[in-house]
Image (cartoon, rainbow, N blue to C red):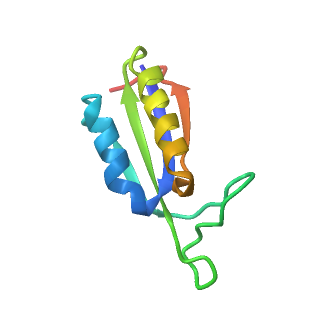
């Protein structure tokens, strides 16, 4: 299994949830009101008076063969929506309950 961690602008919550649903990925954990700042471009999302926008983050566990498909769809979503501020990472899962 693989874990996919996804951070994105809170305004795109529905799009990201629907993307996972498209792949039959029902289970995930979501954090709301996550602050952050991109490494190269984009504005900070810090939830304060100067930078009021915030991010959400999702962690989902998927079968090994599904991770590349989801990452490809996330890349396409990121290119189509440059203000999304999407970052996604695939991590190995060594054990799970």
The quadrant holding residue 26 is top left
**Looking at the rendering, in which quadrant would you find the N terminus?**
top left
Q: Which residue is most to the right? A: 40
Q: Residue at x 52, y 35 (%)?
A: 75
Residue 91 shown left or right of residue 22 in the figure:
right
Residue 40 shown left or right of residue 66 in the figure:
right
Q: At which x and y percent is residue 93?
A: 48, 23
Q: Residue at x 49, y 20 (%)?
A: 94
Q: At which x and y percent is residue 63?
A: 37, 19
Q: At which x and y percent is residue 95?
A: 43, 21
- Above or below 41: residue 95: above
The quadrant holding residue 44 is bottom right
Q: Residue at x 61, y 76 (%)?
A: 51
Q: Which residue is most to the top? A: 65
**Looking at the rendering, in which quadrant would you find the C terminus?**
top left
- Across the whole image, how many numbered discs are drawn on residues? 0
Q: Which residue is most to the bottom? A: 49
- Above or below 25: residue 45: below
Residue 88 shown left or right of residue 32 in the figure:
right
Q: At which x and y percent is residue 36?
A: 61, 61
Q: Residue at x 51, y 54 (%)?
A: 84
Front residue of 96 and 7? 7
Front residue of 17 and 32? 17
């Amino acid at each position: 299994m693989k874990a996919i961690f996804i951070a994105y602008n809170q305004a795109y919550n529905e799009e990201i949830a629907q993307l996972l649903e498209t792949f039959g990925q029902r289970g995930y954990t979501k954090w709301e009101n996550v602050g952050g700042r991109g490494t190269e471009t984009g504005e900070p999302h810090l939830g304060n008076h100067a930078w009021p926008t915030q991010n959400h983050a999702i962690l989902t566990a998927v079968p090994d063969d599904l991770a590349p498909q989801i990452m490809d769809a996330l890349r396409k979503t990121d290119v189509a929506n440059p203000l999304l501020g999407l970052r996604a990472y695939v991590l190995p899962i060594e054990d799970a309950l």
